[in-house]
């Protein structure tokens, strides 16, 4: 009997020990479970807090972008710079350095010059009084599509126009570009058919890819000399090549303002050599940085109506009298009255 009691007692002790061990295991497991639950509960709070920071930053960036957009709306003739967000860092922006930012010129000396020699006597200055359209009654306007656009929308009511889309210096004399009821004829033939006291010549945009600059000088001089032979009493006005807005131009990388400046320098030189009169149209069409005013053209080349009208106003305020051109009369109005109308 005593042996059975001892065995039973040992058996009960073993069971008790097992129960205690199970309870310890459960306590440890539950403790870890509780810690895990607490950790998971606090983690979303931290995530929510962390996610709210980019969200707020994004909204701030949006407001800043809106303010920046409002502040960077450009006005004609002025270039502004904008801030660019750094990739991967919302709410931060890279501000252009002073060397990269286009600043508004403070003085005329700081602006991009529209002519190579602003003191040249060949440049037609602004007159004290404007003329009216009758001044152009004995004038002929020769040029490319830019001159054609001027004819169409400027509101000019006087003058003869010989224009052709794509006209270049090479085609001025030799190619039959001018349409007539009897077929196409050359510019020279068209000019020889009338008597003109003023010739306005606008060429060069289609010659911007010209690599032989010396050759351009000689060919332009030859072409104008031929026109002078046909109209020996005419005042010759050479229009500057108007700047382009390079970002909008799709006709070739040669159509750029660096080339415009190069050819304009040659045109001014020719005017000085030959006694022609240079009309610096970029005086009112330049944005001040050697480019076309931003809203002057939809394609970067051809003028909108507003600026064609400004060009007409410019021509009415920039002219020379027959006296200053060594011709018969000193008064442009009387000159118009005494000349043959076209």
Image (cartoon, rainbow, N blue to C red):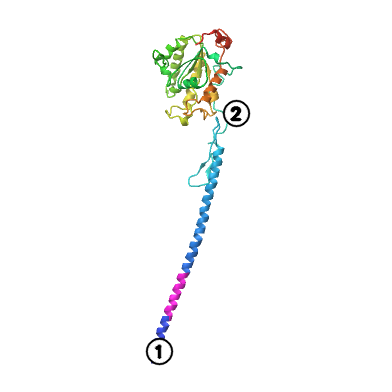
Q: Tag 1, which secondary structure?
A: helix
In the image, residue 59 sits, relative to residue 217, either above or below, namely: below
Position of 179 with respect to 122 (left or right) is left
**Image point 53% across, 48% down: which residue?**
57
Magenta-tinted stretch = 16-30
Q: Nearer the viewer, mark 1 or mark 2?
A: 1
In the image, residue 201 sits, relative to residue 108, either above or below, namely: above
- Crowding around mark 1 (Cα neighbors within 10 Å: few <14, some 14 to 19, many 20+) is few
Residue 131 % position (x, y): 58, 15
Give the CA distance from mark 1 to mark 2: 117 Å
Residue 227 visible in the current orientation: yes
The magenta stretch spans residue 126: no
Extreme residue toward the right, this view: 128
**Image point 48% across, 69% down: which residue?**
31
Q: Nearer the viewer, residue 73 or 7?
A: 73
| Badge 1 or badge 2: first in the primary sequence | 1
Residue, disc 1: 5
């Amino acid at each position: 009997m005593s042996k059975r009691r001892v065995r039973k007692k040992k058996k009960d002790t073993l069971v008790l020990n097992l129960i205690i061990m199970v309870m310890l295991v459960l306590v440890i497991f539950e403790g870890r479970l509780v810690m895990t639950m607490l950790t998971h509960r606090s983690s979303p709070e931290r995530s929510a807090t962390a996610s709210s920071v980019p969200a707020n930053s994004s909204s701030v960036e949006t407001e800043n972008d809106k303010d920046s957009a409002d502040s960077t709306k450009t006005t004609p003739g002025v270039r502004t710079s904008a801030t660019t967000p750094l990739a991967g860092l919302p709410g931060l922006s890279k501000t252009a350095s002073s060397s990269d930012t286009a600043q508004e010129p403070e003085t005329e000396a700081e602006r991009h010059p529209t002519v190579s020699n602003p003191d040249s006597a060949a440049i037609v200055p602004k007159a004290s009084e404007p003329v009216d359209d009758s001044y152009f009654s004995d004038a002929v306007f020769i040029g490319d599509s830019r001159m054609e656009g001027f004819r169409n929308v400027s509101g000019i009511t006087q003058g003869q126009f010989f224009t052709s889309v794509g006209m270049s210096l090479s085609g001025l004399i030799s190619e039959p570009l001018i349409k007539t009821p009897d077929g196409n004829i050359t510019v020279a033939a068209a000019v020889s058919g009338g008597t003109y006291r003023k010739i306005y010549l606008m060429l060069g945009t289609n010659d911007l890819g010209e690599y032989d600059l010396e050759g351009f000088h000689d060919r332009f001089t030859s072409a104008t000399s031929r026109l002078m032979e046909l109209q020996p009493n005419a005042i010759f006005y050479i229009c500057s090549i108007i700047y382009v807005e390079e970002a909008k131009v799709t006709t070739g990388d040669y159509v750029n303002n660096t080339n415009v400046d190069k050819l304009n320098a040659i045109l001014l030189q020719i005017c000085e050599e030959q006694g022609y009169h240079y009309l610096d149209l970029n005086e009112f069409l330049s944005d001040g940085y050697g480019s076309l005013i931003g809203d002057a053209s939809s394609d970067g080349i051809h003028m909108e109506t507003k600026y064609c009208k400004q060009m007409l106003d410019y021509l009415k305020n920039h002219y020379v009298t027959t006296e200053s051109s060594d011709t018969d009369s000193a008064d442009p109005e009387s000159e118009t009255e005494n000349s043959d109308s076209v």
